[in-house]
Amino acid sequence: MYEEFDDYDLSSKLNLKLWKKIIKSLTPYKKIVIWGLIAVAVLTFIETYFVKLISEYGFGKFINGESMDGFSSFIVLMVAMIIFEVIFVKIYVFSAAKIEMYLYRQLTGNCFAHLQELSYSFFDKYSVGWLISRTTNDTSRVSEIISWGLVDAISCVFKLVFILVIMIVTNARLSLIMIIVVPTILTIGIFFRRIVMKYSWKVRKAHSQVSSALNEGISGAKTSKSLVLEEKNLSAFSKIVDRYKRFSIKAAFINSSYYQILAVLAAAGIAAMAYFGGIEVVSGRLDYAILFMFVSYTMMFFDPVLTVSRVSNEMKMAQVAAERVYNIIAIEPELIDSEEVIQKYGDYTNPKKENWEKIKGEIEFKNVSFKYSTGPTILKNFNLNVKPGMSVALVGETGAGKSTIVNLLSRFYEPTDGQILIDGVDYKKRSIGWLHANLGYVMQTPHLFSGTIKENIRFGNLEATDEQVVAAAKAANAHEFIGLLEKGYDTEVGESGNRLSQGQKQLISFARAIIADPSILILDEATSSIDTQTEYVIQKAIGNLLKGRTSFIIAHRLSTITNSDLILVIQNGQITEMGKHEELMQLNGYYYRLYTNQFVEDRLKEINII
Ligand SMILES: Nc1ncnc2c1ncn2[C@@H]1O[C@H](COP(=O)(O)OP(=O)(O)OP(=O)(O)O)[C@@H](O)[C@H]1O
Ligand SMILES: [Mg+2]
């Protein structure tokens, strides 16, 4: 039932091309990356060299009482190293954090910008939950692992190299033990780590199901209540949580066993070093301070090796996350302007408004056929001619194709065949930006953005003054109810306008459409879900909205469209009746039946019979 938002397939192969791309995206922050690397190198050097210094001098010479020569320089060196450590830890943390945030900003910024540009049809294919998970979880995962994880890995490589070099230079024979013993122990360790990973992978998957179940449960809470699904939902949810609990306990057990095995392995390695080194010390070939140093290094050796294996898994995770993020960024919008159109009219980010023609508002559908990417053909050879300033109403059963027609006109989709002409020119010959700047669309379910009423109206025209906002609200008949709200135009509407009623949202979206002053206006089912009183208010508002524009109204309540210049009855993507209200009534067909039924229904409602 629940979609998984967060699955990472770790069996994928190394994708070198992708990593090159990621590393290339760090070029603008080259300086910080270099500083980070220097800091890591200095820190690991200090850490490893410290052990040598303590063993050779502190332990071997001074504590032993051999000689106190050079004790003061030893102390100075120690203090200097500690000061350096403090400084470079700061540099290291600062650069890793900066790289993380830069990458995060770059990735989310690119995703966000790209999602804005993608076509309407893209959002038919990808769910909101999936996209949100990609743009939040995946982007932060990539930036986090690449900054901290990569720095960790590099620091480990440095550490391994430093330790090996110091050991070989100090005593090549004893280093040999390390070179033989450690890889053997490591192979065993890595083998067990795989098992641990497998389980933690299962836990994560189960956890992602819990999150998506919560997500659906919360976003659908109101619907569940109305359908009395609480108990069914709860039992489905309990099963998911139970599974998560089972996997988590098992994973915790395996994980702790893994660390026990590692501790035993590490102890075995240290014991081997102590044993062979001990023989050397006893036979007088080795100073015991050097043995102390070797044993310390053997202990230190396990830490970076384990980190490398952990980070390599994280890198795989980052790779999967990055692949998904870059895949979203790589999706081409399905509807794009041609090169010539962009040359003349500009694009989203750089519109050349000086070349935009003023729209008169003549619209022609010429042999338009259309099908969505899935499903059957919706429109077949659809023809329609609308003169500037005309108001056209579309009526018809649900699924007949009314919204499809206006979506095509708005160029949210393009005809699969045929043409749509605006002022006599195929609309593909002008830019999408040009059309959208001249077109107002009040959707079937109007969406408000969180913010104040004033801000929401102003989205129609960002340069509008407060006076213009009020004038638009008055024209949309919204001024009155806004005045009754505690904070008036500064009232917060809540997430997607939840604090307002459906009818109020509609009026606000009317005001938003009016303030943009579009030449073409589309209202989709503006009056479907409201009471008669609000319907009356909206009816009056619509009258104001239509003045001087070409308009399309899709209405289920026919009272709003009786004055339209042209009414189209749409059935199965075809126009079956067409004309003014009186003409269609005389036809005595579908429209007549629909109108009389509604009329009778309304009268009965008025006298309280139903
Ligand atoms: N995004 C889509 N992808 C695939 N098919 C779609 C899509 N949107 C609509 N359809 C299909 O196209 C047909 C026409 O839908 P449309 O939304 O135009 O109907 P409508 O007349 O506006 O109906 P309603 O009055 O219920 O809003 C329907 O059969 C519907 O299933
Ligand atoms: Mg519709």
Image (spheres, rainbow, N blue to C red):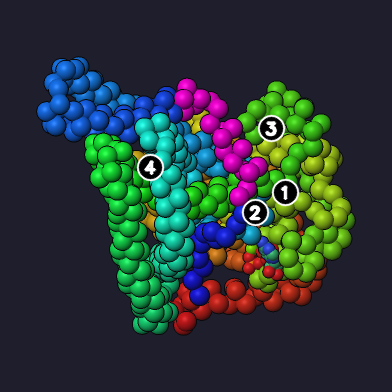
Q: Residue at x 49, y 71 (%)?
A: 2
Cα gap from disc 4 to disc 1, whole angstroms: 66 Å
* Earlier sequence position, callout 2 versus callout 4: 2
Amino acid marked by disc 2: Phe
Report if the CB atoms under discs 4 and 1 are less than 8 Å apart. no
Amino acid marked by disc 4: Leu
Instruction: Give the mark toward the camera: 2 or 4.
Output: 4
Q: Give the vertical position of 326 relative to 523 (above or below).
A: above
- Magenta span of residues: 14-34
The circle drawn on residue 122 is 2
Q: Which residue is mark 4?
A: 174
Report if the CB atoms under discs 1 and 2 are less than 8 Å apart. yes
Residue 473 in the figure: left or right of residue 278: right
Instruction: Give the mark toward the camera: 4 or 3.
Output: 4
Asked whether mark 2 lies closer than 8 Å to ligand 1, one says no
Q: Give the vertical position of 106 relative to 73 (above or below).
A: below
Q: Position of residue 265 (x, y in %)?
A: 35, 59
Report if the CB atoms under discs 1 and 3 are less than 8 Å apart. no
607 and 54: which one is in front? 54
Q: Which residue is mark 3?
A: 347
Cα gap from disc 1 to disc 2, whole angstroms: 8 Å
Q: Secondary structure at mark 1?
A: loop
Instruction: Give the mark toward the camera: 3 or 2.
Output: 2
